[in-house]
Amino acid sequence: VNYETGGWVAHQVSDIWAKTSPDRGNPVWALWQMGGAWLCTHLWEQYTFTLDK
């Protein structure tokens, strides 16, 4: 999926082949705009726990 914009996106839907993509349906329920922020909180927690640079 190419949105022709800078940055990155994390889709929450995966299939049996581990392909992630936007879900179909109403965008209110099909997209997860905070997916990237949610993943970054885990990266930050790991860094603060280990202080591994």
Image (cartoon, rainbow, N blue to C red):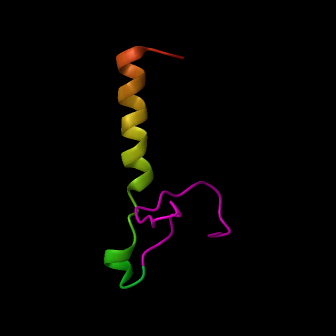
Q: Position of residue 43 (x, y in %)?
A: 43, 33
Quadrant in which the N terminus appears:
bottom right
Q: Position of residue 33 (x, y in %)?
A: 40, 62
- Residue pictured at 48% horizontal, 57% vertical: 10
Prevailing SS of the magenta stretch: loop
Q: Nearer the viewer, residue 2 or 6?
A: 2
Q: Residue furthest top?
A: 51
Q: Residue furthest front?
A: 16
Vertical arrangement, residue 50 with respect to residue 46, above or below = above
Q: In the rendered image, which quarter is residue 39 located in?
A: top left
Q: In the rendered image, which quarter is residue 44 located in?
A: top left
Write down the region rendered in magenta.
1-23
Q: Position of residue 30 (x, y in %)?
A: 37, 75
- Residue pictured at 46% horizontal, 62% vertical: 11
Q: Is residue 29 left or right of residue 31?
A: left
Q: Is residue 33 left or right of residue 53?
A: left
- Residue pictured at 38% horizontal, 56% vertical: 34
Vertical arrangement, residue 53 with respect to residue 20, above or below = above
Q: Residue furthest right?
A: 4
Q: In the rendered image, which quarter is residue 46 located in?
A: top left
Q: Position of residue 21 (x, y in %)?
A: 51, 69
Quadrant in which the C terminus appears:
top right
Q: Is residue 11 left or right of residue 6?
A: left
User: Is residue 3 one of those drawn in magenta?
Assistant: yes
Vertical arrangement, residue 4 with respect to residue 45, above or below = below
- Residue pictured at 57% horizontal, 55% vertical: 8
